[in-house]
Amino acid sequence: MAEKPYRDLNTYYREIFGKKTAKISLNGGFTCPNRDGTLGTGGCVFCSAGGSGDFAESPALSIPEQIQKGKAQTAKKWEDPAYIAYFQAFTNTYAPAEVLRRVYGQAIDQPEIRGLSIATRPDCMGQEVLDLLEELSQNTHLWVEFGLQTSNEHTAALIRRGYPNDTFAAAVKQLHLRRIPVIAHVILGLPEEGETEILSTMDFLNELPISGVKLHLLHVIEGTELARWYQEGRYVPLAEEEYIRLVCRCIARLRPDIVIHRLTGDGDKNSLLAPLWSRNKRHVLNQIHHRLRLENITQGMDWPPSRQREGQ
């Protein structure tokens, strides 16, 4: 089999668990400082009512019940995978450490759960939380996921991210000291951003000890402020061809050791306003892989940026 053009997630998980691995998206019943009034009440401009957890199980179910339901769904696709409990909805370190210990414990105490992935904000990583995560990492595979979205401070303010880049960098370094890998989420197609800003975000991440990156397309979801901008003509989503081109440019720019966890995300088809071409995710992924092969693009070929300037 030909070598893959980027460090992909499936291979990475097989290196760790020796088999196909599935993430079960959970809702721990947390909120977010960008929603409860601490920083704001509306969340980021693109954030849906589910707080980026639209595909998580219902918080009305206990964590063990959510896991069993997620396993039943996964069984339709794969036979006997390894499972990672993925706390996805809202900010999953935004609670006292004793509450977090209880909620996380309900997941990792399930015998089929081999790892834990926690989606949160870098400004919700106090000392007690860091100590708890370090303790948990001694007994299970643990990842922390931060929604950076962009390293452009102007764009971050525009989308109401709510924290500066320095906060992200400091949290990544604190987790790295504790040997806890960090996955950074980046959104392509943010308002007022083009290739220059997107590649600058890749460069920002390359300078930090991150383990993985998730690349997302910006979806316009009903009921969000972004939806109002779109309906008023103030925001134009990326075209499919442009998104594919930008993803390939990101792959070429990222450090070769960084695991690429996603090449595009999913939007809730029941509330997705745009771009409608993103509904066919399999087609988009096939087109990305086709372009990588066609143009002989490999991860890190444009890293560091000086390679491009030197014509290498």
Image: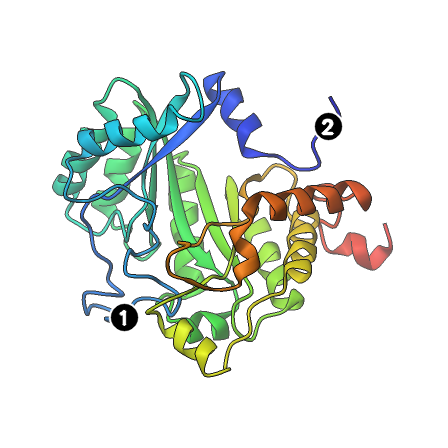
On residue 70, which mark appears?
none
Q: How many marks?
A: 2
Q: CA distance from mark 1 to mark 2?
A: 44 Å
176 or 258: nearer the viewer: 258
Q: Work out whether 168 lies above or below 141.
A: below
Residue denoted by label 1: 42
Image coordinates for residue 233, horizontal then vertical, percent? 50, 82
Q: In the figure, is residue 195 to the left or right of 230?
A: right
Residue denoted by label 2: 3
- Amino acid on which the number 2 mark rests in the picture: Glu
Q: Which residue corresponds to the image point at 70% horizontal and 44% vertical from the top-left?
A: 300
Image coordinates for residue 244, horizontal then vertical, percent? 66, 54
Q: In the figure, is residue 264 to the left or right of 174?
A: right
- Would residue 103 be seen by someone viewing this image from the given angle? yes
Q: Work out whether 167 lies above or below 172.
A: below
Q: Which residue corresponds to the image point at 62% horizontal and 35% vertical from the top-left?
A: 7
- Amino acid on which the number 1 mark rests in the picture: Gly
- Point out the image quarter for the N terminus: top right
Q: Which residue corresponds to the image point at 26% horizontal and 31% vertical from the top-left?
A: 69
Image coordinates for residue 156, horizontal then vertical, percent? 45, 69
Image coordinates for residue 14, horizontal then vertical, percent? 52, 21
